[in-house]
Amino acid sequence: MNDAAPAATLVAPKGYNLEEVTWVHHWTDSLFSFRCTRSPALRFTSGQFAMIGLVVEGKPLVRAYSMVSPAWEEHLEFLSIKVANGPLTSRLQHIKVGEHVLIGQKPVGTLITDNLLPGRNLWMLATGTGLAPFMSLLRDPEVYDRYERVIIAHTVREVAELAYRDYLTTELAQHELLGEMVREKMIYLPAVTREAFPIQGRITTRLEAGTAERDAGVARLDPAHDRVMICGSEAMNADCKTLLEARGFVEGNNSEPGTYVVEKAFVTK
Ligand code: A2P
């Protein structure tokens, strides 16, 4: 909590678990990750989000956050922006190991493998903190069971915002259980729009031009074979939807699977 009370004196509001922060990492002045303990009773599917936050003035102050950690992991991990005057993130950015956060007991979301029809390549299109649900999915063996190639295209404004870049470039491929599948199937396509970088430009521009597929070394996006998950700002989601639908992709949801799914990367103030 933002007050310094020990956990024993804090009571979780109805519908939330109180979890202890175990790790904090600041990527930039405006981006950080943290881990906390996970109640064994908390169930979720990789790619989903939960309401998380702090008790402020006796009340829960929560926002939607995608889990970065996969469903099988013992702890929970989240990726957050820091907004100086944001009600939640202005406080959450100062969280320290040993302090407590609220975790909603009912994770939900559309970015799950069951909402997509079977296919050949799975494209994950992320901008900014929209990477979070894909970090979870990229560590779920089911994703690799279902697809021949899993392409994570993360686009940000500046190089420093490529959170988890080292992990995706080297560590994940060495993972004890996932490493072999990752080495065989995962393709990481980091891109930057406002600084020099090997891959530059918006994902929409690169898909229009075919350079995203060329950089990944795969065939042009095709709804007959490929599946897409999108997670970014409202504008990015809308532009990706337009591009995909013009090519015949159909949106899937929790009642009917499709050839693409989309979710807002929650701008959590
Ligand atoms: P750009 O630098 O050209 O605006 P943001 O921080 O605004 O959410 O942006 C994160 C990344 O998403 C940036 O690289 C940004 O590119 C890109 N982006 C923003 N809007 C769109 C859009 N409508 N379609 C595709 N990419 C977008």
Image (cartoon, grey):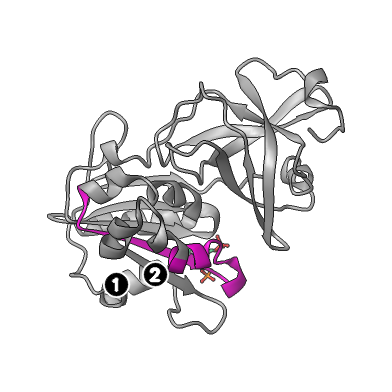
Whether the residue under disc 1 has CB within 8 Å of ligand 1: no
Is any atom of residue 233 visible in this view? Answer: no
Q: Position of residue 252 (x, y in %)?
A: 27, 40
Place residue 221 in its image quadrant. bottom left
Quadrant (top left, top right, bottom left, bottom right) of the C terminus? top right
Q: Which residue is mark 2?
A: 189
Say if the magenta span includes residue 166: yes
In the image, the segment drawn in magenta is 146-170
- Judge whether 236 appears above or below 8 on screen: below
Quadrant (top left, top right, bottom left, bottom right) of the N terminus? top right
Whether the residue under disc 2 has CB within 8 Å of ligand 1: no
Around disc 1, counting alpha carbons within 10 Å, would you say few (fewer than 14), some (14 to 19), or many (20 or more)? some
Contact flag, marks 2 and 1 (Cβ < 8 Å): yes
Q: Position of residue 72 (x, y in %)?
A: 42, 37
Which secondary structure, mark 2?
strand
> Marks 2 and 1, how far apart in space?
7 Å
Sequence-first tag of 2 and 1: 2
Is any atom of residue 206 visible in this view? Answer: yes
Q: Amino acid at mark 2?
A: Leu
Q: Which residue is mark 1?
A: 216
Along the line of sight, which residue is nearer the eye, 29 or 248?
A: 29
Q: Which residue is at the far right?
A: 4
Q: Amino acid at mark 1?
A: Ala
Task: Give the residue drawn at x 21%, y 70%.
Answer: 218
